[in-house]
Image (cartoon, rainbow, N blue to C red):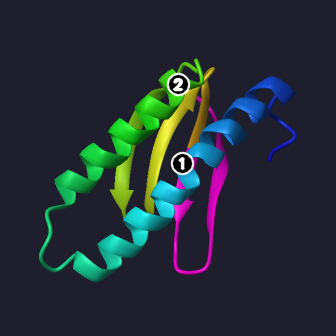
Amino acid sequence: MNNLLSPEITKNINKLFEDMAQDMDYFYGRWQDEKECEDWTEYEKCLKNNLSQVAIKNNINISIVKVTKRPFGISFNIDNNYVVFYANAKHIGWKYKGLI
């Protein structure tokens, strides 16, 4: 959490993250195991689709910016704030990256 975010935006990000954490963990682990033989674009599609569906389900307006394999994550805008959900070998989390 970041003190620069309003409580409402923080609540929405936390809700999105709560619903995406398992997917982030799964896709990160799978990518680490299969990156030599699987196509990254399929991971991009899945992560974008999953986050979009979670946002729709929770009635939260977001705009996906990009999906990256290194660092593994998905970036999006929510109420003019740039946020990244990420996964690595030790942690799954989210970072506030500033206003857009």
Q: Residue 7's quadrant in the figure? A: top right
Instruction: Say which residue label 2 marks.
Output: 57
Instruction: Say which residue label 1 marks.
Output: 20
Residue at 25%, 44% in the rendered image? 45
Q: Position of residue 68 (x, y in %)?
A: 36, 56
Depth check, front residue: 86 or 42? 42
Residue at 71%, 41% in the rendered image? 14
Magenta part mainly helix, strand or loop?
Answer: strand
Q: Does residue 71 show up?
A: no
Per the model, the C-alpha gap separating discs 2 and 1 is: 12 Å
Q: Position of residue 50 (x, y in %)?
A: 40, 40
Depth check, front residue: 77 or 100? 77
Task: Check residue 97 for magenta coloring.
Answer: yes
What element does badge 1 sit on? Answer: helix
- Of callouts 2 and 1, the N-terminal one: 1
Task: Check residue 41 for magenta coloring.
Answer: no
Depth check, front residue: 24 or 9? 24
What element does badge 2 sit on? Answer: helix
Depth check, front residue: 93 or 5? 93
Residue type beneath disc 2: Lys
Residue at 42%, 31% in the rendered image? 52
Residue type beneath disc 1: Met
Magenta residues? 84-100
Q: Does residue 75 show up?
A: yes
